[in-house]
Image: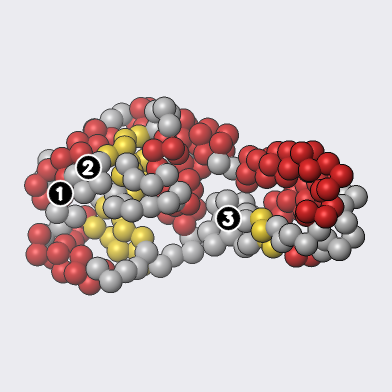
Amino acid sequence: IGLLPVHFAEEARVRLLLAGRGELEEYLKRLTQELGVSERVTFLGFRLDVPQILNALDVFLLPSLREGLPLSLLEAMAAGRPVIASRVGGIPEIFDATEMGCLVEPASVDDLTAAMLSLARASNEERMRLGVNARARALGVFSARQMIAGYEDVYTDVVEKLGANAQDELSYQLVYVSCGLCGSSEHHIVLRHAKELYNGLDAHFDLSLIHISEPTRPY
């Protein structure tokens, strides 16, 4: 918000949409008034229509100070949006060597300004190219299907290594399968893979214990 009147005074088209709620919300609203940029900043609050919001964006911005593997970033990538994000937690792993936006140092005003100006001044074609790369990266590496294949590889490898002892070792283990990146339409895929994987194991293994977590924000 503080960058708008200083660095984006000549970029009148730039608008900032802030989604979500938090303890700084009222302070930030006052700040927009004090800086005279309230017409350029929209506070969306808590929303359930995230796919529609993402489709309305030109660039997704995640200037976090701390992160794990942020689902919001993966959602924006899957929506085909170029992204700007902090170099913290698992975010560099998400980017890898993919040209899909900008990685910035956390809390670096200079880095964030340069990245925002770069993408704000980029052509529509360039932003589209970065967005296509982002979507390909998200769906090719971080999709639910890729996650399921990874689980299957791990469990299959364990079963093969344990051999005859597999039943004794795995009979009472609880498998937690999280489908945070997929909608309910994908749940049957998880169950089918789980059934195939554990077919023939000890009868004490209760398949109903496999937990499928509902997605909080479907694409």
Asked whether the beta carbons under mark 2 and mark 1 sit within 8 Å of each other, the answer is yes
Asked whether the beta carbons under mark 3 and mark 1 sit within 8 Å of each other, the answer is no
Cα gap from disc 3 to disc 2, whole angstroms: 29 Å
**N-terminal-most mark, 3 or 1:** 1
**N-terminal-most mark, 2 or 1:** 1
* Foreground of the two, 116 or 202: 202
Locate residue 170, reporting x and y percent: 78, 54
Q: Residue at x 51, y 34 (%)?
A: 137
Q: Taking 31 as reference, is 63 left or right?
A: right
Task: Name the mark on residue 136.
Answer: none
Q: Is residue 184 above or below residue 166?
A: below
Task: Label 1, secondary structure: give it.
Answer: loop
Q: Residue at x 66, y 58 (%)?
A: 176
Q: Taking 148 as reference, is 40 left or right?
A: left
Report whether residue 7 is seen: yes
Q: Residue at x 31, y 35 (%)?
A: 102
Report whether residue 76 is seen: no
**N-terminal-most mark, 3 or 2:** 2
Task: Name the mark on residue 3.
Answer: 1
Q: Taking 13 as reference, is 92 left or right?
A: right
Which dot, 2 or 1, sits closer to the camera? 2
Amino acid type, label 2? Leu
Which residue is under mark 2?
Answer: 112
Which residue is under mark 3?
Answer: 180
Instruction: Give the crowd class for mark 3: few <14, some 14-19, many >=20 residues within 10 Å.
Output: some
Q: Is residue 25 above or below residue 63?
A: below
Amino acid type, label 3? Gly
Locate residue 142, reporting x and y percent: 55, 41
* Foreground of the two, 173 or 104: 173
Task: Label 3, secondary structure: give it.
Answer: loop
